[in-house]
Amino acid sequence: MLNLVDVTNSYAHEISKELRNSPAHFIKVYTLGNSIVVHKKKESSNEIVISNKLRSITEKEINFVLDNLLGESKADATISRADKVIEIRSDLS
């Protein structure tokens, strides 16, 4: 069973720095098993990166993240795939 665990507090220093130096106004970090999920919201878009140092990201993991973090706006998401990194972008309406 998949479960997103919020580990944002463990990355507080890095997130604070990123928020100061980028147009993002919201950043959350989650673990999904041994994968890391970073969710950034900017003024006009959502950006999600799923990464795993050990293996490729599965379709089940991608769909779980889309369902839980984007909800109904997942239909508009653009997904870029690399072996161990997935980037998802969805424009905000």
Image (spheres, grey):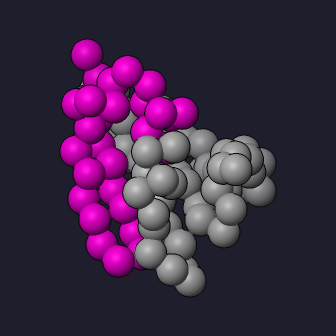
Is 69 colored magenta in this rendering?
yes
Q: x, y percentage for residue 8? A: 70, 48
Q: Answer whether residue 77 is visible to the viewer in this image.
A: yes
From this viewpoint, is residue 21 visible?
no
Compare residues 48 and 63 and report the one nearer the observer: 63
Residue 6 locus on image (x, y percent): 72, 45
Residue at the spot x=60%, y=43% of the render? 28
**Residue at image location 33% in from the left, 31% down from the top:** 74
Specify whether 28 is left or right of 67: right
Q: Is residue 8 above or below residue 31?
A: above
Give the residue displayed 37% in from the left and 36% down from the top: 46
Q: Position of residue 48 (x, y in %)?
A: 42, 48
Residue extending furthest top?
93
When the figure is inspected, residue 90 is found, relative to residue 7, above or below; the finding is above
As drawn, 91 above or below 47? above
Q: Is residue 63 shown in magenta?
A: no
Total number of numbered labels?
0
Q: Residue at x 64, y 56 (%)?
A: 32
The reply, left or right, for residue 38 in relation to residue 63 is right
Nearer to me, 71 or 89: 71
Residue numbers of the magenta segment: 65-93
Task: Tell which residue pokes out farthest to the bottom in this image.
Answer: 54
Quadrant for the C terminus, please: top left
